[in-house]
Image (spheres, rainbow, N blue to C red):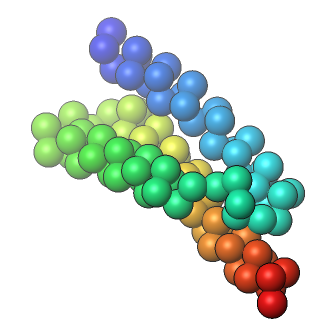
């Protein structure tokens, strides 16, 4: 039961990442994005993945962690692209 609830939590969080990526791509600016927030979320997902591996609790939940990590990592890439766009506008 705990794995199901953990998966529900991860899926709920995970649903927001594609929306965030889309909005950030569309905005073409990093002004509304927070690098520290993105990095903090990445560290959290990496910690969750390491915990699953360390406890040998390899299940479908691990896949959800990895999918979420990938989506947040895409957002990180978009942040740097948008940051570069911001520099072009200023200069």
Q: Where's the C terminus, which quadrant? A: bottom right
**Residue extending furthest bottom?**
91
Q: Residue at x 84, y 81 (%)?
A: 89
Residue 27 in which image quadrant: bottom right
Q: Is residue 71 left or right of residue 56?
A: right
Query: At which x and y percent is residue 62?
Result: 37, 39
Q: Residue furthest top?
A: 1
Residue at horizontal 57 percent and vertical 63 percent from the top: 76
Q: Is residue 36 above or below residue 45?
A: below
Say above or below: 24 vs 17.
below
9 over 67 or under it: above or below? above
Q: From what the image shows, is residue 11 above or below residue 58?
A: above
Residue at the location (40% across, 50% down)?
Answer: 40
Q: As drawn, is 43 to the left or to the right of 81?
A: left
Residue 29, given in percent of the width and then of the height, sits at: 77, 65
Residue 28 pos. (x, y %):
82, 65
The percent position of residue 64, horizontal first and vertical second, equals 47, 38
- Does the rendering let one see residue 16? yes
| Front residue (pair 35, 21) | 35
């Amino acid at each position: 039961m705990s794995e199901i609830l953990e998966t529900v939590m991860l899926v709920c969080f995970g649903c927001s990442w594609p929306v965030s990526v889309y909005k950030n791509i569309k905005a073409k600016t990093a002004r509304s994005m927070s690098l520290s927030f993105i990095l903090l979320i990445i560290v959290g997902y990496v910690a969750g993945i390491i915990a699953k591996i360390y406890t040998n609790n390899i299940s479908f939940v691990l896949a959800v962690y990895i999918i979420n990590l990938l989506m947040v990592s895409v957002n990180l890439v978009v942040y740097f692209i948008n940051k570069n766009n911001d520099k072009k506008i200023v200069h």
